Amino acid sequence: MKLTIYFILSMMMFATGRDYKLQKNNLKISIEKIYKIPEDSFVFKGNYYSIEIFMINNTNSPIKFWTWSCSWTENWLTNSKNVDFYYPECNSNVPIISTINPNGKLIIKGKLEVIKENYTLMKNIRIGFIMIKEDEYNDYTDNFYEILGYKFKEKKDIYWSEPFNITEKNSN
């Protein structure tokens, strides 16, 4: 009897670990392009970079998640205190559901700001996406920012890119 219970518990632990690992591979965050924006072509002075992010769905099912219609950067973070997303001003901003089709990709174009002055190279930068799944938020009863904060604090449902470097002359 003890052997049977041990076997069942072992199988449950193995299956849970395997499913979790597969789940993390279901969505890939990839940096496809990054280049420095010349200071004279951007409204603000500073070190800004245009970035193209691919969110790749590696499943045969659609991936649906909540984000904002304008301030989509709320779901994103970096692993560096010296690099952050540029937050655009918004006239109208509401939570929306975004969908990535099966085996498809969503291309996001944004801007990063390097806050550190007098840098020549920022190494091993990663960006992360905090996913709020379609069924985890109700527009009428839930607080979007509380869910984001909880997931950030618990390190739950954060999908990270591979490390990349930012130089003053980026041109990937």
Image (spheres, rainbow, N blue to C red):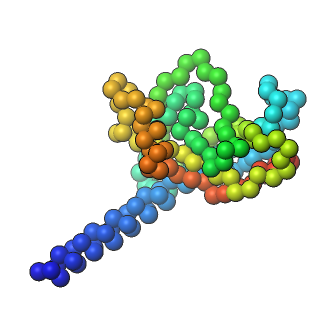
Residue in the picture at 59% in, 35% down: 73
Residue in the picture at 40% in, 29% down: 143
**Vertical relation: 138 (above or below) 21:** above
Q: How many numbered discs?
A: 0
User: Quick check: 86 left or right of 26?
Assistant: right
User: Quick check: 120 left or right of 102?
Assistant: right
Front one among 73 and 78: 78
**Vertical relation: 116 (above or below) 141:** below
Residue 24 in picture, x, y percent from top left: 47, 58
Residue in the picture at 31% in, 69% down: 13
Quarter where residue 83 is shown:
top right
Residue 42 in picture, x, y percent from top left: 81, 28
Residue 166 in picture, x, y percent from top left: 77, 50
Front one among 101 and 73: 73
Q: Residue furthest top?
A: 91
Q: Residue furthest left?
A: 1
Specify whether residue 85 is in view.
Answer: yes
Specify whether residue 30 is in view.
Answer: no
Front one among 99 and 27: 27
> Which of the image's four quarters has the N terminus?
bottom left
Q: Residue furthest right?
A: 40
Residue 95 in picture, x, y percent from top left: 47, 28
**Vertical relation: 64 (above or below) 56:** above
Residue in the picture at 57% in, 53% down: 160
Front one among 27 and 16: 16
